[in-house]
Image (cartoon, rainbow, N blue to C red):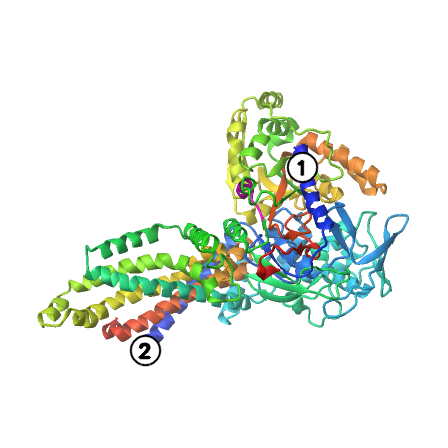
């Protein structure tokens, strides 16, 4: 098992290197610079001397390959650089925002799991029933709804009309501020997870070993608990992991809508201001998050199904 | 247009006089919104030229001058008076003796010298250095040729002498967010970015990155009896529709409105009586690059101005949240010529001008544009059929907002659409058409006109304000006649406010920025804010 874990962790390194290269190349060729973004709102007249000073101070006048070597060297030392905008270490900025994003993504995922997994299971056990139909219609609707629009709708209903919840912000960090953004973010994974759970369970229910279990005289509950659930779990966990990994990236829109102080809103502002070190650092952290989750899931797989270790 | 402005001005004054007519009430919390992004770049506001950080400056810091929205001019803020030499170059400031920083340090001339040196220091690369450059010796200091700024001289703790490079009004430069005064006794300058200390009416309490900055009343503020509020939450809310819900839900006290919301609020009986409007000092325009042959001929540029039905675009797309531009300087500018009408919508005249210029068969060009709804791709798309009718084919060239400045200042465009600051200082605004101003500075259309230069240079030397204004008015009229740009509109900024809010002012430099120390909340506010 230890060798398996080490192998999976080592596989992260080349992925990170490719991602780092891609991010660097993309932001080296996109038009616009931090210096020019300072007067992009037209409020301040352009100042060539300031542009020159900023370009020199941040080393943007150096050739691309020199900057890349410097970037990779710093990265190897876990130094994500210094933000052009805030003049503070990127790691510090990400640390300020990462935990609120994780909190939001985790809450959204819990909301999705708590509803989707039981619903998907029940729908699969009663295919063609009203519950099954309603669940699948709901799942399709959940996948089709634009999150931005859904968020506005929830704000309108629960904040403006019912006056039950705050419409925006982090406030004092209390749970009531988390509900609307988490539900909005959680609806898409909920829909996906419900469909996947239903499909996975249906697949297992039709497997030979389930028929064998039934023929051995086991009760329906025993078959579901010991044979169906355990075998459907691999697919469900995979889906949860993939969704959780991608939620941080998806949260960008929701964070902006609800003024939630997460890593997504930091990324949006940094892209628009061409604060390249923060953009690079933030994307890397999001990618890392995705890779770590997947690695953890792979390890869990191996624990559930020892055959996977052989692959 | 002017009638509308007058109504707007009266409305604005109504708010001010209402505030003056009642006894301000002390106490309460103001939930103010910062709508220009999802974060504050820094709390060290000397380092940021963006409006977003000015919301913090307004609360925590003070500059030597401040903008008086009602007088429409810069006024002394940290000095009680200033003596000016006959040649207009030397200003002797008598500083406030009761101004104290939040760390209990009294304001002295040393703090101002320290602050201006910090801003001008090349290693900091602050944009405010261009404002400090009006002081003699600042350019040499920035270039590393001297240890001190020669034009800054401490007479005593409470008296400071500033020598300028030219006889201009220093108020416009020294009232900026980026020229705020910091205390000189802070050992670690890095703390300015995490726990700012200033002279303002509120002291820093908390920053929740990406969420809000909280400031609390500073009891030693130099204006007696002020501020009225106990606390201000400066809340980050970049999303218009979310802000709309929060405002209607009474969670926030003010909200800057876009064109669509402006229309909706005007027709809502519950909201329409609490809207503040002002003509801001921004001119939306399409700049023409004279490197394109057709744009070398002013008749082509004038033809474009005649070919576009500007009032129609303002009405339909901008929802009347703008005033049609006649020239470069905005309505609130003292040098604005109210007798000079805007270009009339006259397609026949446009065709005739194009034919005279040798473009009877038409021409084609592209407009570099950001996605902005009020001065971006949607506006260019609205112009397309109008220009097509006179034989001009326009292709929008979309770019991201942050790439627009880069394209323009590197002269990499045929035409561009932008919103540029055109005030409050008319002398500085017209600098962008002076032939000695570099294209990469702000003479984006590489404008060069000998008659304009003569008037502008005379205005720079003129000490009599009335004569200077007259010279600038004439210069502005030349810009209008030469049409280096399509004059689109002057922004009408609109702010909705809750009925319990008093003391807002029609700030033409940026309506979203309000003097927190003047604002007070009456008894009708929700319990959590009283």
Q: Residues within 10 Å of mark 1 (few under 14, many from 20)?
A: few
Q: Quick check: can you spot residue B125?
A: no
User: Can you give x and y, in whole percent of width and height, for residue A228 in the image?
Assistant: 20, 68
Chain to which the residue tagged by mark 1 belongs: B
Up-down relation of residue B205 to residue B177 (above or below): below
Q: Is residue B180 above or below residue B413?
A: below
Say which residue label 2 marks.
A3
How far is the residue under mark 2 from the one under mark 1?
77 Å
Q: Secondary structure at mark 1?
A: helix
Q: Position of residue B318 (x, y in %)?
A: 56, 38
Task: Work out whether residue B246 or residue B466 is closer to the camera in this orientation and state it.
Answer: B246
Q: Quadrant of the C terminus of chain A?
A: bottom left
Quadrant where the N terminus of chain A is found in the figure: bottom left
What is the number of the mark on residue A1? Answer: none
- Please check the rendered image and state whether residue B524 is part of the magenta-colored stretch, yes or no: no
**Does the magenta stretch mainly form a helix, a strand or a loop?**
helix
**Left or right of B228 on screen, residue B81:** right
Image point (89%, 48%), residue name: B87
Of residue A11 and residue B311, the one placed in the foreground of this image is: B311
Q: Which residue does the numbered mark 1 point to in the structure image? A: B7
- Provide residue B493's location: percent of width, then percent of height: 62, 44
């Amino acid at each position: 098992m230890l060798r398996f874990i080490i192998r999976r962790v080592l596989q992260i390194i080349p992925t990170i290197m490719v991602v780092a290269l891609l991010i660097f190349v993309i932001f080296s060729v996109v038009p616009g610079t931090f210096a020019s973004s300072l007067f992009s709102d037209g409020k301040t007249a352009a100042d060539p001397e300031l542009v020159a000073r900023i370009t020199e101070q941040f080393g943007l006048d150096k050739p691309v390959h020199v900057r890349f070597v410097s970037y990779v060297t710093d990265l190897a030392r876990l130094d994500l650089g210094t933000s052009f905008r805030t003049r503070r270490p990127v790691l510090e900025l990400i640390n300020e925002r990462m935990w609120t994003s994780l909190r939001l993504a985790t809450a959204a995922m819990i909301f999705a799991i708590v509803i989707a997994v039981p619903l998907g299971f029940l729908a699969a056990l009663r295919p063609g029933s009203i519950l099954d139909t309603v669940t699948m219609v709901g799942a399709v609707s959940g996948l089709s709804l634009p999150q931005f629009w859904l968020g506005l709708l929830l704000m309108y209903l629960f904040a403006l009309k019912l006056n039950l919840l705050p419409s925006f912000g982090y406030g004092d960090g209390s749970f009531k501020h988390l509900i609307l953004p988490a539900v909005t973010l959680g609806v898409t994974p909920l829909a996906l997870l419900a469909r996947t759970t239903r499909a996975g369970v249906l697949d297992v229910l039709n497997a030979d070993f389930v028929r064998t279990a039934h023929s051995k005289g086991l009760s329906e509950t025993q078959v579901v608990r010991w044979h169906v659930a355990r075998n459907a779990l691999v697919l469900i966990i995979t889906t949860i992991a993939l969704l959780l990994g991608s939620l941080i990236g998806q949260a960008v829109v929701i964070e902006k809508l609800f003024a939630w102080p997460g890593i997504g809103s930091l990324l949006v502002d940094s892209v628009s201001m061409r604060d390249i070190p923060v953009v690079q650092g933030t994307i890397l952290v999001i990618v890392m998050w995705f890779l770590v989750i997947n690695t953890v899931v792979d390890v869990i797989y191996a624990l559930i199904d020892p055959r996977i270790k052989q692959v | 247009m002017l009638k509308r402005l007058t109504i707007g001005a009266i409305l604005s004054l109504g708010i001010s006089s209402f505030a003056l007519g009642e006894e301000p009430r002390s106490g309460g919390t103001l939930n103010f919104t910062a709508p220009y992004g999802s974060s504050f770049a820094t709390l060290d506001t000397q380092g940021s030229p963006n409006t977003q950080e000015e919301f913090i400056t307004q609360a925590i810091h003070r500059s030597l001058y401040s903008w008086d929205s009602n007088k429409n001019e810069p006024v002394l803020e940290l000095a009680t008076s200033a003596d000016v030499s006959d040649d207009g170059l030397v200003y002797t400031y008598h500083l406030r003796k009761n101004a104290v920083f939040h760390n209990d340090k009294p304001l002295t001339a040393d703090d101002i010298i320290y602050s201006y040196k910090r801003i001008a220091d090349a290693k900091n690369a602050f944009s405010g250095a261009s404002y400090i450059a009006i002081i003699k010796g600042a350019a040499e200091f920035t270039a590393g040729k001297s240890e001190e700024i020669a034009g800054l001289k401490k007479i005593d703790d409470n008296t400071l002498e500033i020598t300028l490079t030219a006889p201009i009004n220093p108020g416009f430069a020294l009232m900026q967010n980026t020229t705020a005064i910091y205390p000189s006794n802070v050992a670690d300058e890095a703390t300015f970015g995490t726990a700012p200390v200033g002279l303002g009416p509120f002291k820093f309490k908390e920053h929740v990155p990406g969420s809000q900055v909280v400031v609390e009343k500073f009891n030693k503020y130099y204006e007696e009896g002020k501020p009225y509020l106990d606390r201000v939450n400066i809340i980050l809310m970049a999303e218009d529709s979310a802000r709309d819900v929060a405002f209607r839900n009474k969670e926030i006290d003010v909200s800057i409105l876009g064109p669509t919301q402006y229309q909706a609020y005007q027709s809502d009986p519950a909201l329409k009586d609490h809207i503040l409007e002002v003509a801001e000092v921004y001119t939306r325009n399409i700049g023409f690059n004279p490197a394109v042959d057709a744009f070398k001929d002013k008749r082509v540029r004038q033809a474009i101005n005649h070919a576009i039905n500007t009032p129609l675009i303002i009405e339909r797309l901008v929802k009347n949240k703008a005033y049609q531009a006649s020239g470069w300087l905005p309505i609130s500018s003292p040098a604005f010529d109210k007798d000079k009408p805007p270009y009339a919508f006259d397609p026949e005249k446009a065709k005739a001008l194009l034919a005279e210029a040798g473009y009877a068969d038409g021409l084609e060009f592209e407009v570099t544009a950001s996605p902005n709804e009020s001065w971006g791709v949607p506006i260019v798309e609205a112009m397309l059929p109008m220009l097509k009718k006179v034989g001009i084919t326009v292709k929008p060239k979309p770019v991201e907002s942050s790439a627009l400045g880069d394209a323009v200042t590197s002269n990499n465009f045929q035409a561009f659409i932008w919103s540029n600051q055109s005030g409050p200082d008319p002398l500085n605004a017209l600098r962008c058409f002076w032939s000695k101003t570099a294209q990469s500075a702000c003479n984006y259309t590489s404008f060069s006109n000998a008659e304009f230069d003569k008037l502008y240079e005379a205005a720079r030397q003129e000490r009599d304000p009335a004569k200077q204004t007259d010279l600038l008015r004439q210069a502005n009229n030349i810009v209008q006649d030469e049409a280096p740009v399509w004059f689109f509109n002057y922004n009408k900024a609109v702010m909705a406010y809750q009925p319990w809010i008093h003391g807002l002012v029609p700030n033409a430099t940026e309506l979203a920025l309000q003097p927190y120390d003047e604002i007070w909340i009456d008894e009708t506010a929700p319990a959590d804010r009283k």
